[in-house]
Amino acid sequence: MKSIKLNLGKRSYKILVGQGVIKELPGVIKSLKFQGPIVIITDKTVAKKTGRIMTPVLKRMPNESFYVIVPPQEGSKSIEVFQETIHKISKTTKTHRPVIVALGGGVVGDLAGFVAATYRRGVPFIQVPTTLLSQVDSAIGGKTGIDLPDAKNLVGAFYQPKIVLSDLDFLKTLPRTQIRNGLGEVIKYAIIRNKGLFEYLEKNIGKILSSDISILEKIVYECAAVKADIVEKDELDTRDLRIALNFGHTLGHAIEAASGYSNLLSHGEAVAMGMVLAGEIALRLDMLKESELNRIKSLVKQSGFSMKIKGITLKTIMNSYGYDKKFIAGSNRLVLPKSIGKIEIIEDIPLILIRTVLRKYV
Ligand SMILES: NC(=O)c1ccc[n+]([C@@H]2O[C@H](COP(=O)([O-])OP(=O)(O)OC[C@H]3O[C@@H](n4cnc5c(N)ncnc54)[C@H](O)[C@@H]3O)[C@@H](O)[C@H]2O)c1
Ligand SMILES: [Zn+2]
């Protein structure tokens, strides 16, 4: 088991990474010295897939525990599911303040975190991420929230967990499409901060896609360390440091929005394409060597991501990019790679350049 400390004064916490770390959960709750009931928020698929691992853990819980099960996928980050979840908790826990455990991917983590942040003005919260994406990204850093019909993540709060338990055993049941989805973020961390990780990914991509747990363990640890370091320095996203995590996401979001968040492409695929496009722009601004761009493209391709944006027009992508608030205010901003492991934030990129690189892939 490996441990990373995220230093945030009184709100500091540990991220434990390893096979079997879920066994720490009863002890962690005991150490919180909390008398209330334990509410485990999860989705239907996760409840089923993690049953065998969770049964012995639940038997050792210090306090009474019960599950609140929500439907799987993004639809559960809604006002309706938020309200139903709170209602179930208040009915069952009565006057006691509960501890909330998020057992699941980013959807469950974001929803349960927001429930914990708001229920009775905040109750203790523990993250148990079960997807690659949530172990490397969403479970760390305290961004919680739900979607509104107007936009994703429109309502939320910064609310840090007491601990993150990233158990690699959970990833054994994760479908390959979800491993790939998380891989988009993993490649992002490597390009923004960790050249060694990029080389490791190049060497081990085959084993990663076949869910080799010891390889995934190193990857989760390396990515969690990068995220923890960035969050520590810019917890509330006010110091222009957390923006590095947007690498591949600005153009990626424009592509996702243009697809109407349909199943034309996943978030990971949109981010992978966004990183390639950012690399192409950096090449044309003489910031990035062609050989480095080729390595990025090659890793993205070997990860099984498509190198073409299908079923979406250039015009719709440019439209959704143009609606970006920052752009309307007069200047656009992109995180661009300078080399593998280093990035720079560049402003006022000519639209014609963005259009040119997009045309290559649409
Ligand atoms: N808070 C943040 O900082 C942050 C960062 C990045 C993404 N996010 C959010 O995360 C969400 C995406 O997270 P995600 O990709 O984990 O999606 P998800 O939670 O929808 O999980 C993906 C699918 O995998 C299933 N699943 C989960 N664990 C499993 C397991 N161990 N075995 C088998 N199936 C399993 C789920 O039921 C679901 O169908 C988005 O809503 C996004 O906005 C938040
Ligand atoms: Zn992302």
Image (cartoon, grey):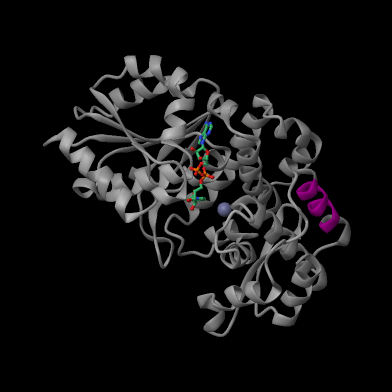
Q: Residue at x 68, y 61 (%)?
A: 274
Task: Decide if residue 100 is on the left or right side of residue 109.
Answer: left
Q: Position of residue 130 (x, y in %)?
A: 50, 34
Quadrant of res 104: top left
Query: Is residue 108 in sight in this rendering?
Result: yes
What span is colored magenta in the figure? 293-301
Q: Nearer the viewer, residue 299 or 165?
A: 299
Q: Position of residue 132 (x, y in %)?
A: 58, 38
Helix, strand or loop: magenta stretch: helix
Query: Is residue 350 in sight in this rendering?
Result: no
Task: Decide if residue 288 is on the left or right side of residue 315.
Answer: right
All told, the count of numbered labels is: 0
Question: 63 above or below 111?
Answer: above
- Most distant residue in the right direction: 291
Question: 222 above or below 210?
Answer: below
Task: Decide if residue 168 is on the left or right side of residue 281.
Answer: left
Quadrant of res 125: top left
| Screen quadrant of the C terminus | bottom right
Q: Nearer the viewer, residue 328 or 124?
A: 328
| Screen quadrant of the N terminus | top right
- Most distant residue in the left direction: 95
Q: Position of residue 138 (x, y in %)?
A: 49, 46
Q: Residue at x 76, y 49 (%)?
A: 300
Q: Residue at x 67, y 67 (%)?
A: 312
Q: Is residue 46 magenta?
A: no
Q: Position of residue 342 (x, y in %)?
A: 71, 57
Q: Is residue 297 magenta?
A: yes
Q: Residue at x 43, y 21 (%)?
A: 51
